[in-house]
Every structure is written in C-alpha cells, then in structure tokens.
Image (cartoon, rainbow, N blue to C red):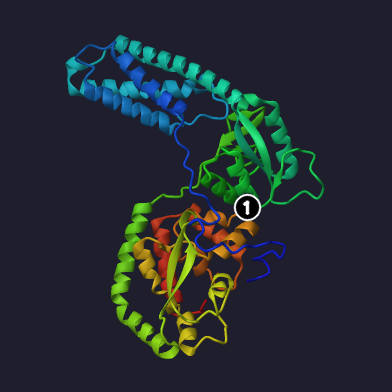
Amino acid sequence: MTTESTSPATTTVVPPQGAADRVALPPRRPVPAPPFVSSLVATDCVAVLLAALLLDPGQRSAALLMQLTAGLVVLNGYAGLYRPGAVASVLDELPTLAGRAAIAWCAAAALLAARSAQLAVGLAALTAAYAVHLGFVCGCRAVLHHRRRAAARAHPRSALVIGSTTAAQRLAETLARHPEYGIRPVGIVTTHRPPAPAESSLPVLTTPEEIHRAVIQNSVRDAVFAGGEQPDLIALLCHYGCVAWLVGDTGDGTPMSQHLWGHACRRLEAPPAHRGRLPKRVLDVTVAGLMLAALSPILLLCAAAIRLSDGPGVVFRQERVGQDGRLFTLLKFRTLRPADDEEAATRWSVAHDERMSVVGTFLRRTSLDELPQLWNVLRGDMSLVGPRPERPYFVTKFSRVHPGYAARHRMPVGLTGLAQVHGLRGDTSIEDRCRFDNHYIDHWSLWQDVCILLRTAASLIRPAGS
C-alpha cells in the first residue's frame, strides 16, 4: 500500500470467524412512503371522484376516471408534489397544483370529445369540475400540512449536520432554536477535526465509523449539508436511509425555493444504487457464460500447470465483502500457498513474494488467476464490472480512514472496474480507487460497462500483473 492509503493511528480488528455476514455497512434501509405521502395520493384520487359527479352520467365512465386519476398522479409525482419539503405550504404549491389539474382535466375532456361528439364536456361543467377538484385538494393539503408541522414539532427527526465546523455548528444551533422544521441535530460531520474543543455540545464526527455509530444509535433520518455537496457522504448517508438536504447558496444557479429560517434549502437526490440492475445482470450472465465456455481449455491448462508445479489445491477460496457488506467466497487459481489463515486474511500484497513459483508469477502477470471468478459472476456474487471486492479486514480498516470507501458497496463488486482500467491495481492508492469506484457508481450506464470490458480486454495484451 502507498502511504496515502492508510493511517498509522488507526486501530484494526480482524473480524472473528462466524461473525455476522455483513461488514462495514448495515443492510440498506429503504425509506418507506410515510402516511403523509399516501394521504396526498388518496386526496388526489378522491378529488377526481368528487369532481366527476358534476359531469353527466355518460361522461364519467370507469375507464376515463382511471385514466384521469393515473395521469394526475403521474403529473403530480413528476412535479415533486408527493415529496414534501422541509416546510411545505399549500400556497407555495398552488400554482403547480392548479397547472397539473388543468392539464389532466383538459386532456380528459379532449378524450371524451374525440370518442363521441355527444360526450363532449361543456365549458361550464368542465370549469365547475376543475374548481371542485382544486378546492378539495387545496383544503385537504392545508389540513395535512398543518398536522405534519405539528407532528414534526412534537417529534423532530434526528439529523446530522455536515460541513465545515463553524458553518455546521451555526446551522445546528439555528435548527435547535426552531423546532417547527422538525429537525433535531444530534451530531456534526466534518472532514477535519477542529484544533480546539468546539463550543457546541454536539459530538463532532470525522470518520465513517463514527458516522455509522451515530446513525444507528440516534436513528438518524436527515442529513443536512451546510454550503456544499459531498457526493461520497451523500451516498453513504442515503444508504443508511437518510434524506439529504443542501442548505446555503452553492453558487451553481440551482433554484432553491425552500428555506430553513432564511437559509436556502433544497432536497438532494440519492445516487441511484440499483438503477439498471436487470440489464446489468443480463450482460453479466451472457458474457460470463460465453467466456467460461470459450476459455474452458485455458482453464484446464492453468489447473494442470498449478497441479504439476505446486501440488494439490488448484483453486484458492477467500472470503470477500460484496454488495451491501455481504460476505461471499471468491474463487481464484492458487498462485501462492499462505502460511496460515491469518496471513491470507490480513496480508496486503504478495505480487513479489519469493515463495511464488514460475507458474504462479505467470498467472498473476497475465491475470489468468482471476478467471475462476467468472463462476462468481454467474452465481450472482459479483458482476463483470464494479468495485473490486476486498477482504473484511481491509474493508474495516479502509472504511475508518477513507470517507467514501464504505459507499463503494452500494453496487455489486466486479471482476474489473473503472479504477482497474486506469491502472489502479495492486499496491496503488486506496483513496484514488475509492474516488474512481464511487464515480463509476454515481454515473453508471450499460454502455460504460461495455467500454470498461473492452478496455480490460485490451489491457490484457500488455499485462502488468496485480
């Protein structure tokens, strides 16, 4: 490892055998739709039914009402009307509500007129239905928002405030003084611990391990970023099920219509962790299956060479950490026989070990020792492309040192990855690998996977080893 990769002050612990099957990350905590959101959807559905009573019996067919309701829910959902802000007001929502309702009712009237001239809705009837719909929705939303604000004040959600120490402390104090926002700061997250004791009574968190404990112990549901986005921390906290908010002017021109006591505020989108899962899995199974079939003679030759050169035990099995911290058994051709289990679990690199035979050295330099992992891909333990899996010992260690390391496990681990095609293999910077891996996850596309596979195939022509 490079000096950039570790910290000598970090204390590491080897996970005991038979421990829990997750390391570094707890199970993903999806945020369920709260009753408030379900009530908003139900309000829109009931509003359509009430407004339809003003139409003639022949005009309010079940098919039309279903189409109208579905269209309205989609329009409102796309506009973010089911994702309440920090402090929502029906007056702020009124222009958007009115516009979406008008589009839905005009579309319904057009469908009726296209079906039959006798079913055409008159202007007076259409206006009355629209007015009843909008009035009912606004009245119900006003009641729901009032009840939500009262519940937030009575039962505020625990939150972490992220940013520079001074800015985060000021924002935390503001939120503590104004419980109407329903956010109760329980800790401050900063990348650098202040040189002197902070005046705030809140704990200052600087490592992923401390963030992990704070989230679990305090049931944190909100992450408030003071003055700037930090993608790695956003990804990590969203993995824990937190809602991320950006507070303060970022200077990028992004509209921020909401505010927290005068501080501009907007909700941040969680990085897509499971986007494209089916296409990615289809690519994995197709390519891995074809490669195993095509490379079976090479696999047999490698196995025979290892058996003749180094004796029995052709396949090496090692515990690695996969998606969401799940442990799985990774398969490789054996290139070196470790002295014991502890060496296999905790020794970083054996690329230049004198105990390695000529066959083992050749397999490592050509990456042929990685071919059995195609079976891991077929089984679903791994993907063809993704962050490279690491041993539990090093996952625990690196997660304490590098803020974004744990966030790498949002996606299936891979046989190759964006970091590897940029030369980050073996004894290279963990920080750089972490940055490449998180960039790959945040900007994933199926075409990017294809490009990485092609670049990996090209790199095998000029092998550099691991």
Answer left or right for 308 relative to 181: left
Q: Position of residue 195 (x, y in %)?
A: 80, 50
Quarter of the rendering containing residue 433: bottom right
Q: Which residue is mark 1?
A: 209
Q: Is residue 165 above or below residue 108?
A: below
Amino acid at pointer 1: Glu
What is the count of numbered marks? 1
Where is the N terminus found, in terms of image quarters? bottom right
Label 1: how many Cα within 10 Å (few below 14, some 14–19, many 20+) = some
Q: Position of residue 98 (x, y in %)?
A: 43, 20
> Toward the viewer: 416 or 95?
416
Q: Position of residue 129 (x, y in %)?
A: 33, 13
Residue 230 visible in the picture: no
Q: Residue at x 45, y 16 (%)?
A: 140
Q: Residue at x 49, y 16 (%)?
A: 143
Q: Is residue 389 above or below residue 177?
A: below
Q: Position of residue 190 (x, y in %)?
A: 69, 47
Q: Residue at x 58, y 29 (%)?
A: 258
Helix, strand or loop status at disc 1: helix
In the rendered image, the residue lying farthest to the right is 196
Residue 229 visible in the picture: yes
Quarter of the rendering containing residue 244: top right
Q: Residue at x 71, y 27 (%)?
A: 177
Q: Is residue 86 above or below residue 130?
A: below
Answer left or right for 205 relative to 443: right
